[in-house]
Image: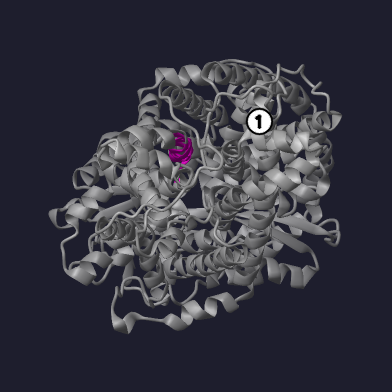
Amino acid sequence: MQRPSPGSLAARPRARFLAIGEPGVTAFALITSAALLLLVAYPLALVFAQAVFPQFPLATSGASLDAFQRIWASNYHLGVIVHSAQVGVGVAIVSVVLAVPAAFLVRRTDMPARGVLDLLMLVPFTSSPFLTAEAWIVLLQRRGYVEQLTGLEASRSEALLYSYPGIVLVMALHLFPLVYFSVAGAVAMIPTSILDAARTSGAGWRRTGLRIVLPSLLPSILGGALLVFAAAIAEYGTPAILGVQARFIVTAVDIANLTSQHPVDRPLAAALSVVLLAMTMAALVAARALVAATSHQGARSGSSVTRIPIGYARWGGFVYVALLAIVAGILPWAAVIATSMLRTVSGGLEWGNLDVQRLLALPMQPAAQQALLTSVELAAVASTTVAILGTAIAYLLTRTRVSGRGALDVISMLPSAAPGVVIAVAVIIVWNQPFMPKGIYGSQWVLAIAYAIVFLPYGVRYAVAAMHAVPATLDDAGRTSGAGEVRRFRRLLLPLILPSIVSAWVLAFAIGMRELENSLIVRPPGTTTVATYMWQNFAQGSVIDGMGMAVVSFAVTCAALVAIRLALGRTDPPLG
Amino acid sequence: MRMTLPRRSSVLRSAAVTVAALFGAASIVACGGSTTAPTATPTATAAAPKAAAASTTPSATPKPKPTGEITLYTAGPDTLAKSMSEAFTAASGVKVNVFQGDTGAVLAKLDAEKANPRADVIILADWSGALGLANGGLLASYLPEKGDKVPAAYRDSDSRFIAQGLTGLGITYNTKVVKTPPVLVADLAGPEWQGKVTMPDPAASGSVYGIVAAQTQKLGDTAGWALFQNLKKNGIVVLGTNAQALAPVLTGTKSAVFGAADYIALTSIQKGEALKVVYPADGTVIAPRPMMILKSSSNMTAAQAFADFVMSDAGQALVAKTLIIPGRSDVAVDPARQPLSALTPLPVDWSKAISAQPEALKKFAETVTR
């Protein structure tokens, strides 16, 4: 962190709560906090309430920590929690190892084809975890596509898939974009002058990397790793599909079973969710301690940032990033696309078993079109809400001194650690209450609310990072020139952080188009999203039609994302 | 773009503030939550006398014409839900709002909505799920017209739920990889089936649990569990739902699935998949798919009219079309499948099964799944 210069915003003496001297900020803080409390804190509070009041929401008698005691007394539940921690840490580490070199190569060196590869880094994130796991099964299982196409016997790859390392690999290949996009921005802020100074002082590439590059990237690496950790311990899809055969159960699967298998035991499920939330807070504290223990230089405004030529090594870099893009993004989608074009699953990958007409006819069906329209509407509305609310929260966190704003930071982070089924049940309980506005729970817009809760952590983290990167001196210059709060935000801050906000919007939109767990439970009668349409097909044994819907939705998502990228230009600052 | 995180002490303070705020909010919300429960009872008391009147005197008073709309939560096939609701709307003018999902999703949604229920009619694939709801006092007592044509074993003695369809849980195998088809369940414990068999999870489906209950009720505890232990020794893999257990058999990765609902495989066979369904004499269980009306329904007349329609000739014909055996014994099955009379099912004493369920599921999880 920069040492605050005297007279800058950060060095001003702490203002009293609600009395910064600009009443507009107070009102703004209150409105933003109210929105966050209603949207996120209220449902999460209900999760806590369910853990402590077993009869909730019908009665509030018998407050007890019995649910927590049952967890503590059960080897099974404790073992499951340990598994979740193992998955979280493993996936976070592998994601960092995969993403950091890729981000540096693509955003900072003269590696060839970097524009295309940068776009491809989003692809792994466009499929729901469940679909990714299914794709890998279809590829690697005995009589799977790899065996059919190459003749290589699949028993070893199948054994790898249904194991802890397999689960970690599949999840890391799916989640590493979170670290990638977090680091990609920071990589573009390291002044070239420092790197040159290291070179001229005699430091080799390895030393420069370890002593200069990594420390300055550490906050962004840890921020991305934190998001990955939370997402990994909360994820249901991959562990549910691969973990059963691997005999490796995680807490998210345990919670889902307790919520949807008879007899439903919501207090225990809620208590386990509280454990996951506590694990995320512990990770937050650990990450912060790590950052505080290492000192690093911040970017100075005005320093030049250029691409680093790396000679022949850029071809090695190209091979690495291309391989990553292929294995993580293209291979699974190729399996899904291939399956969607088959006539029968048992017929396998044979030329005579192709039926492309079926796939092409799918978008023509009214039910499919309705599902697509619903998903696009919901994802767009939720992403926009999160972009606005996330920016507002980030502004409060980084640009004001309202006391208690740290709680906003933690509350907005927590939903990423809650499994989808937990958020779904909480959203239903909150919005199904008689005193809530009538038109929301019965309509598709309750899903937009659920999506917004799921996206908010990403929106806030990306906006906070972007605002931190803009030096406070810019604000002060605006203030001394006579600009008010709103004008400073609109003319100075917003144009600089807009690329990051758009990145967050794009990421949220991609998640929204394929969100499954909340949608399956929260959606009202008559509403179908692309993910639930896909799921309903799978559940009735129509694997081919399910995959077909996934392909159509993928095409729509990619088209939308490419259009946005082209319309707004590149999201990273242009480098010389 | 640099991600910075707040100082450790301020994080701890923020965390403490957050937790305190959440617990405070939880208490406030909990107090508010308890006042919503009473609003559910007025509709229940209003509906109960109507339901009682309808069930005790079905033909004495002419039924009021159904109006308005009803909400249906169903775990049944999506195609059936659509065709049934469209046909009912065409016949009566009543709009049907359909929520279709897995049994788990339906149960989770119903449970979450407990304080302010939304559903009128529920159709599950899980007999034990229906008994659970009935024992919780949530179901209305109503015998649909022609409901007496359903065998007594497949409807509740208090008319709280009735089977609108039945499926047979046999063995489905892939004809491309299997040279000698299995005849008995015990065959699946043989060497040629090593590591090649899957089974849906009884914890996820009360129908599949019926298999476990039937075997232990027929063979006694020791021999019954020995069968599952032998299957486990032979490498059987327990995979969540019907579809998840069937998927590897479709690709040929596994050779057979034991205990999956037959209509899914039969529909796949119609689409050209290389599967065959057999009903072993030592282990076929019939899984009734119950339909029920919630006591809290705010449109009891229309809900009962819908139940009548499902059990009518037209409704049961729609059920038969999806290759499910109609609940009424006087309605024919689709020619693409075997009728109920061709199967020799193991009987299941469901009330005994339900009371033994928690223990049995635990033992199954420890013995076979994990």
From the viewer's perspective, is A292 left or right of A338?
right
The chain carrying label 1 is: A
Q: Position of residue B159 (x, y in %)?
A: 65, 47
Residue B72 location, quadrant: bottom right
Q: Residue furthest front?
A: A200
Q: Residue at x 77, y 16 (%)?
A: A16
At label 1, the amino acid type is Leu
Q: Residue furthest left?
A: B191
Q: Position of residue A134 (x, y in %)?
A: 38, 57
Q: Which residue is mark 1?
A: A397
Does residue A462 appear in this view?
A: yes
From the viewer's side, name the closer residue of A480 and A153: A480
Q: Residue at x 79, y 43 (%)?
A: A487
Which portion, as a residue range, is magenta?
A220-236
Q: Position of residue A152 (x, y in %)?
A: 16, 64
Residue B41 location, quadrant: top right
Does residue B295 appear in this view?
A: no
- Count up the numbered dots: 1
Kindly report the secondary structure that dominates the magenta region of the rendered protein: helix
Above or below: residue A358 compared with residue A143 = below
Residue A367 location, quadrant: bottom right
Q: Residues within 10 Å of mark 1 (few under 14, many from 20)?
A: many
Q: Position of residue A41 (x, y in %)?
A: 67, 31
Q: Residue at x 65, y 31 (%)?
A: A398
Q: Secondary structure at mark 1?
A: helix
From the viewer's side, name the closer residue of A501 and A111: A111
From the viewer's side, name the closer residue of A167 and A228: A228
Asked whether A300 falls inside the magenta stretch, the response is no
